[in-house]
Image (cartoon, helix red, strand yellow):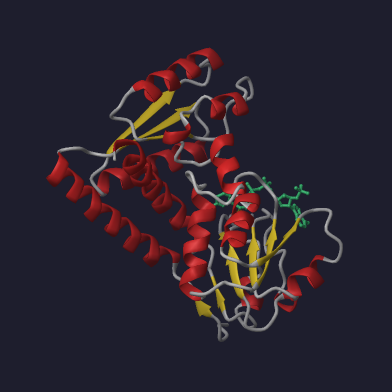
Amino acid sequence: MTGDARIIDGKATAAALRAEIGREVAAIKATRGLTPGLHVVLVGEDPASKVYVASKERLAVEIGMNSVAHRLPAETTEAQLLAKLAELNADDSVDGILVQLPLPKHIDTGRIIDAIDPAKDVDGLHPINAGLLAGGKNGLVPCTPLGSMLLLKQALPSLSGLDAVVIGRSELVGRPVAQLLLQADCTVTIAHSRTRDLAAVVKRADIVIAAVGRPRMVKGDWIKPGATVIDVGINRLPDGKLTGDVDFAEAVKVAGAITPVPGGVGPMTIACLLKNTLTAFHARRG
Ligand code: NDP
């Protein structure tokens, strides 16, 4: 059953964003003879990671970027991976570097992220980029938080003064999205697994960003009527279907606007990776 909430279409928004980036890439090629380059590094055979890397590669090619996937065997050592990153850091034609996570257990993820040139860190996870964001200055911003904000602003052009609750405090999603909301002048609460009475905390929010990883945890009666709900969660149910962290069927009857899963934040993540590659190109090559 569908209620009154406006459904925020992440698929269409992502397609429009990719088309816009594609036009800019074409203009750069035509006027400067340069092509922005995205390099994705995959170590090992994780099936989900292989699918993600293939989509990133395909969509970057589709908009005219140079797109290279470096597929390294699972037994690649940390030293070999660091050497690959040093090579990509030094190559002027490489604008964006993304190391697909998770890495095999014998590799220290933090050490690898630290080794990416912050100017090419299109995942926005390097401590320099995280520090810039925490200081209210944008370097490269993580893709999923950036995509979530673009969808949110579509539903609510002015965020100033609104109460926002972010559920989840990961480095990848919760923390950076909270920083972006603060930059947009929201009053931000960050909830997590130790939060007391999460339902009451969510109930007072004009904006709810759910980034937990628990299927349909956020119930319809937790949502303030008319609130905007951005569901970042991607959870696979036993029947193979994907669902978000929000109980969509309930929440759609209460919210003012809501993102579906699939078709909400998910498609925005790759579109924002391409956007970040272009941002990195402009920042580094003028
Ligand atoms: P993490 O597992 O790193 O973080 C989950 C967060 O949720 C933690 O901060 C945790 O709290 C909090 N949490 C767990 N249980 C509860 C609970 N019962 N009540 C309140 N908070 C809770 O996950 P990520 O941030 O990486 O990802 C979150 C979700 O977003 C996942 O479903 C993931 O698949 C999805 N995702 C989607 C992307 C997309 O492109 N759409 C991209 C990245 C992620 P604590 O810190 O206390 O443990």
Looking at the rendered image, the quarter that the C terminus falls into is top left
Coordinates of residue 58 in the picture (x, y in percent): 32, 44
Looking at the rendered image, the quarter that the N terminus falls into is bottom right
Q: Where, by quadrant of the figure, is residue 178 drawn?
A: bottom right
30 w.r.t. 227: above or below:
above
Is residue 6 something that shows in the picture?
A: yes
Coordinates of residue 90 in the picture (x, y in percent): 36, 21
Q: Is residue 190 left or right of residue 123?
A: right
96 w.r.t. 109: above or below:
below
Please name the residue shown 44% across and 40% down the image: 122
Residue toward you, 230 or 184? 184
Please name the residue shown 54% across and 40% down the image: 129
226 w.r.t. 148: above or below:
below
Residue toward you, 119 or 273? 119
Q: Is residue 190 left or right of residue 10?
A: right
Coordinates of residue 133 in the picture (x, y in percent): 57, 47
Q: Where, by quadrant of the figure, is residue 228 drawn?
A: bottom right
